[in-house]
Amino acid sequence: MTIPAGAQTPRMPWALLAAACLGMFAASSSGTTRAPFLLDMARDLSTSLTMVANLMAMTSIAWGVTSLLAGAGSDRWGRRPFLIGGPLGLALCMIGVATSPGYLGVAIAVTLAGGCSGAFTGVIMAEASARTVDRQRGRALGWVMFGQSLSLLLGVPLAAWIGTFIGWRGVSLSVAAIAVLAALGLLATTLRPAEAPPAAPSARPSLRGAMSGPVLRLLAMGVAERVCYGLSVVYFATFLQATYALTPAGVAIPLALIAIGNILGTVVGGQLADRLPNRLRTFAAAMMLSAVIALALYAWVPGLVVTVALGFAYVFVNAIARPCLMAALANVPDGIRGTVLGLNVTSASFGWLGAAAVGGWVMAEIGFAGFGPLAAGAAMVGAGLALSGRRPRF
C-alpha cells in the first residue's frame, strides 16, 4: 500500500493483526505444546522417546514445503482461501492428533498440521503487509510474530498445567479450538479487500519472478538469523541443566525470562524498523551485537543469574533483527509478496533444522563451549550479507 506525499498515515489494522497474532499462536503451539508431554506420548503410543521427538522434524519439513506453495498460490488466487482454510485445516489435524490410537496416525496428523500451518503463516504476513504502508510494516509484522513468541511464554507453561488435568490429547483439542477462533477472526477482518497498489508490470506472480538477487540475499540473512535463534530455543534449557544441574522444573523461570526477552526484542525491533532509515544496517548491528553476547554466554559461566541475564540479552538483541528483515522482505511488489514471504518461511525452516542438527553435533563432539563460536559465526554471516550490497529497491 502506498500513500501520496504529505498525506496522513492510515491507521494500523489492529483487528486483523490481533487475528493474525492468534493464528500464529495456534500454529506455533501446535508443535511447541508437545514439549512437556514427550515421555507421556512415548508411553501412550508404545514407541521410543526419539521417535516422538522426530515428530517436530516432520512438522517443520511439511511447514516449509507448503509455505512456498501457498505463498505462490496466494499471489495467483488470492490470500483469503489460505488465511481461513489453513487454520481450519490445522484444527482438523489437531483433532486427528488427539484421536489417533497409534504412532503412525499421530505422525500423519502432525505432518498434515505442519502443512496447514505453512499454508497460512506466510500468507498472514503478506496480508498484514498489504494492509499497511512501508513505515508501518516493521511494527505490523512484529505484532504478527508476537504470536509465535507468546506460544513459548504462555502456550507451553499453560499446556503443561492444563495437561495435568486433560492430558496431551486434551491439549491438542485446545489448540484446535484456538485455530478455529483464529480462522473466524481472519474471516471477519478480511471481508474488505486490501487496497490494490499501483500496477507493477515487471512483477509476475511466480517463483521465478520472486527469486531475484536482492530477495535471495534477504532470505540467506533470514537463514542465518534463524540458526542463531534456533540454537537458543532448542538447546538453552539443556545448557542450563548441564551447567547448573537444574531439574526440568528449575528451568521454567529462566525460560520464561528468555521468552519475555524475545517478545520485548520483537516489539522494539518493529519500532526501529519503522523509525530508522536503513533496516539492513539495523539488522546488521543487532546481529553483530548478538555475536558478542553469544561468545560470552557460552564461554563464561560465573553463575546462574548472570547466565540467564546474558541469555535474556542474547534473545532480546537477536529478536530486534527479525522485524527489520521481515519489513525489508515485505517491501516487494504486491504481485509477488505472498511468494516471497512464503519463501521466507521455507528458508527459516532450513535455519531451524540446521540449528538443531549442527547444534546437536557440536554438543556431542565439542560441548556447549562450541555454541558461542557457532552462534557468533552465523550472526556475522547474516551481518555481512546485510552490509554486502546496496539496499534492495523493488
Image: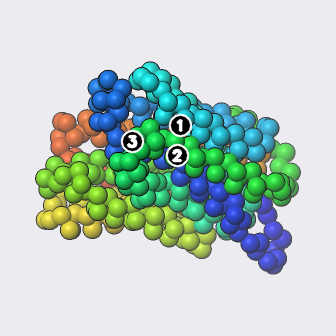
User: Which callout, 2 or 1, points at the residue further toward the start of the chain?
Assistant: 1
Q: Which residue is mark 3?
A: 167
| Mark 3 nearby-residue class (10 Å; few <14, some 14–19, many ≥20) | some
Mark with earlier residue (1, 3): 1
Secondary structure under tag 1 reads helix
Residue 270 seen: yes
Bin the neighbour count of mark 1 within 10 Å (Cα to Cα): few under 14, some 14-19, many 20 and up: many
Q: Quadrant of residue 288?
A: bottom left
> Which comes sooner in the sequence, label 3 or label 2?
3
Disc 2 versus disc 1: distance between alpha carbons? 7 Å
- Residue, disc 1: 94
Calculate the distance from the C-alpha at mark 1 to the C-alpha at mark 3: 14 Å
- Image coordinates for residue 183, horizontal then vertical, percent: 67, 48
Residue depicted at 61% across the width and 69% down the height: 274
Return the residue at label 2: 175
> What's the residue type where badge 1 is placed?
Met
Residue 1 in percent (x, y) is at 78, 60
> Judging from the image, what secondary structure is the residue with disc 2 in?
helix
**Residue 130 x %, y %:** 74, 56
Q: Are marks 1 and 3 in contact (CB under 8 Å)?
A: no
Instruction: State how far apart marks 3 and 2 are (Cα).
Output: 13 Å
Disc 3 residue type?
Answer: Gly
Q: Residue at horizontal 79%, vertical 42%? A: 78
Query: Do residues under tags 2 and 1 come within 8 Å of each other at their CB atoms?
Result: yes
